[in-house]
Amino acid sequence: MTTCIYVINLDRSTDRWNALSDQAKTLQFDLVRIAGVDGREVAADQRTAWDERAFQRNNGRTMLPGEYGCYRSHLKVLAAFLETGEAACLIVEDDIILSHDLVVRAEAALAAVPGADVIKLFNHRIVGFKPVATSAVGDEIGRATHGPQGSAACYAVTRMGALKLLQTVGVMRFPWDIELERGWASRAQVYTTRQNVTVVEEGGSNIGTRSVYKATKFPWWRRLPTYAIRIAETVRRINYALKK
C-alpha cells in the first residue's frame, strides 16, 4: 500500500505549506492539505465540544486558543480520512521535516503490530519503553510507562483507530497530544516507535511558548485536584503499557 499523508496547515501559514510541498515533491510523497482550525479566530463563546471545567481540572490551567484549534484540527483530519476508502494514513503537523523513509517505516510499523489503531512516530520523550514488536525495517514499537510523551506532530492511524477516537474523544478535556496517548480511555490500541521517524522544526509550534503556558497555570492550591488526577492517570498508563 502507499499511505497518504494528511497535513494540518493553517490558512495563514502559506510558507509552511510551500516548504512542506517542496519536500514532498522531492521525495515523491502524496500530501493532502487539511485547513487547520485557527483557535485564535474562534471566540471563547463560539467554541464547541469542549468541557472547560474538565480541562481546567485535568490540566491545572486555562486552555490556550491554539490548543483548541489543534484539537479540532486533528478531529477534522480523522473525519476526512474516514470518508475515503483508505486503510490507514499518516497525520502530520506542518512544522515537521519529512524524512525519505517516513512512509516505509510507518507502513512497516503498522504491519508489525496488526492490532494497532494508532502508532505515534514522533515524541518529545520516551521513558520506560516496553517493546511489543520490531518492524521489518528495524523500528521497535511499543508503549511507554511514563508520560505524557509530548507532541502529536506525526502519527499513523487506521480506519478503526480514527473511528474509535471520533466516537470517544470528541469533547475536549485534554490537549490533543495528551488525549491521543490515552488509549485506556478511548479503547484504542495506541503504540509508539522507540525512535522518532521524523523531526520537527525547532520553535515551530503555533500554540505557545513555555512562558505562555506558564502564565496559564493556576496557583498550586488550585492544582491539588490536578495532582490527584495525574497520579491516577499515571497508574492507568502503566497498566495500559504493561498489559499484553
Image (cartoon, grey):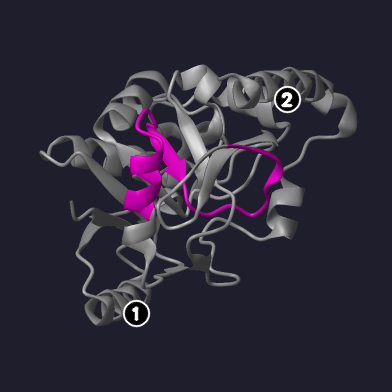
What secondary structure is marked by label 2? Answer: helix
Which residue is label 1 attached to?
Answer: 19
Residue drawn at (23%, 68%) of the image: 29
Residue 201 against residue 35 in the figure, above or below: below
x and y percentages locating residue 206 in the rendered image? 51, 61
Q: Secondary structure at mark 1?
A: helix
Give percent across and percent down for residue 210: 72, 58
Q: Is residue 117 visible?
A: yes
Quadrant position of the C terminus in the picture: top right
At horizontal 33% and vertical 60% (from top left) the residue drawn is 104
Q: Is residue 52 left or right of residue 135?
A: right
Q: Residues within 10 Å of mark 2 (few under 14, many from 20)?
A: some
Neighbor class of circle 1 (other Cα within 10 Å; few <14, some 14-19, many 20+) is few
Q: Is residue 225 magenta?
A: no
Near-viewer residue (124 or 212)? 124
Label drawn at residue 160: none
The residue drawn where x is 81% and y is 27% is 223
Amino acid type at mark 1: Ala
Above or below, comparing residue 63 to residue 173 in the picture? below
Q: Check if mark 1's residue and mark 2's residue have beta carbons within 8 Å.
A: no
Q: Nearer the viewer, residue 100 or 64?
A: 100
Which marked residue is nearer to the observer: mark 1 or mark 2? 2
Where residue 19 sits, quadrant-wise, is bottom left
Magenta range is 106-131
Q: How many marks?
A: 2
Residue picked out by circle 2: 234
Residue 226 horizontal side relative to residue 66, left or right: right
Is residue 9 in view? no
